[in-house]
Amino acid sequence: MLKEYFLFSCIMHGFENSDIKKMDHSGAVYIDLLRYDSKALHKTDSLAKAFVNSIGVSSYENRNTKGIIILSIEEFKSKRINDFVKSMDIYMLKE
């Protein structure tokens, strides 16, 4: 579920200037359900923000826009994110 939180964070950071945060309560749900110390959540959020900030403007169809969602999904599926999530196991809360 931490991996999904990464994707959620990418979308939130990618659309910071929109009303998406006002219209969606997914962040609160993830915070309630994730069984990780807050350090893991902060590290995941920081990684997502850095990733989104690294996305450049594309000339796809001469729109000069960013492919935030498609590139975030690709990153979500990457080995790099799998390895990152595995490294966060040290922050899992004991029940």
Image (cartoon, rainbow, N blue to C red):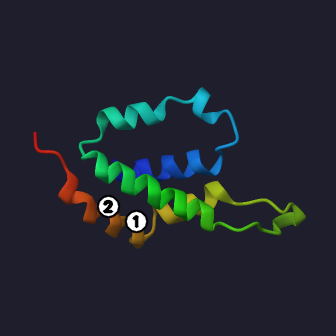
| Residue at the image point whose x is 59% and y is 60% from the top | 52
Q: Which residue is mark 2?
A: 85
Q: Amino acid at mark 1?
A: Ile
Q: Position of residue 4 (x, y in %)?
A: 42, 49
| Residue at the image point whose x is 53% and y is 57% from the top | 49
Q: Residue furthest left?
A: 95
Q: Amino acid at mark 2?
A: Val
Local SS, label 2? helix
Q: Which residue is mark 1?
A: 81
| Residue at the image point whose x is 81% and y is 67% from the top | 60
Q: Position of residue 82 (x, y in %)?
A: 35, 66
Q: Is residue 1 left or right of residue 47?
A: left
Q: Position of residue 21 (x, y in %)?
A: 58, 33
Q: Is residue 73 visible?
A: no
Q: Is residue 15 visible?
A: yes
Task: Give the spatial CA distance, label 1 vs label 2.
Answer: 6 Å
Q: Residues within 10 Å of mark 1 (few under 14, many from 20)?
A: some
Q: Residues within 10 Å of mark 2 (few under 14, many from 20)?
A: some
